[in-house]
Amino acid sequence: DLSFPAVMALSMMSFVWVFENGGFLGLAFLAAIVTGTLAGALNGYLVAKMGIPAVVITIGTSFLFRGLELAAMSGSGFPLTDPALDPLRQILVGRIFLDIPMQFIWVLVVAILLWALLNRTRFGSHVFLLGDNATSAKLMGVNIMWTKMGVFMLVGAMAGFAGLVASFEVSYFWPTLGE
């Protein structure tokens, strides 16, 4: 998915928009993750429905998502220094125990969750089948379109989360996030 950096920025744009307009911090966080998931759903739908290679679709949507984000933000960034953001900053990029960064903890959590998803669920089996041979996966009853969309939605959600972590690490949302 070559649109990952643009989805990071688009998700952060949603976070900033909800937060600036009086949204609850949890709602702003959720807006970022949902925006990434929806962007991934669009990518997955286009790839699965049109049959065009993912690299071509995601290059195109990368320009679309980046353009939407730059237009909505007027090319300007947003400082993430408001004290109301401190609880989320601690959770995303704070330090724990012996000065261990939370990013390390998040990598472990995401790795374990993705391992469980891929190795212990029907969806994970379908992903492996689809990656090995789409024709045989289809013959085995795997819904190719929904599996591809699910994978792209998962990548989109992770892009939204990555955008939050990257922006909170530097306490600023740059409109060129991910480039």
Image: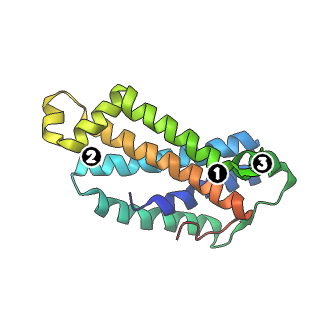
> Callout 2: few (<14), some (14-19), or many (20+) C-alpha neighbours within 10 Å?
some
Question: Label 1 neighbourhood size at 10 Å, few (<14), some (14-19), many (20+)?
Answer: some
Q: Residue furthest bottom?
A: 75
Q: Amino acid at mark 2?
A: Ala
Q: Does residue 55 appear left or right of residue 69 in this picture?
A: left
In this image, 10 relative to 154: left or right? Answer: right
Q: Which mark is residue 103?
A: 1
Nearer to us: label 3 or label 1 = 3
Residue under label 2: 48
Q: Is residue 75 above or below residue 12?
A: below
Q: Which residue is mark 3?
A: 98
Q: Residue at x 50, y 63 (%)?
A: 6
Nearer the N terminus, badge 2 or badge 3? 2
Give residue 71's position: percent from left, percent from top.
57, 68
Q: Position of residue 159 (x, y in %)?
A: 52, 53
Circle nearer the N terminus (3, 1): 3
Discs 2/1, front: 1
Examine the rendered structure and indicate whether residue 49 appears above or below residue 172.
Answer: above
Tags 3 and 1 touching, CB below 8 Å: no
Coordinates of residue 57 in the picture (x, y in percent): 32, 60
Q: Amino acid at mark 1?
A: Gln
* Residue at the farthest front position: 98
State the CA–CA distance, disc 2 to disc 3.
46 Å
Observer-nearest of 2 and 65: 2
Mark 3, secondary structure of its residue = loop
Numbered-mark total:
3
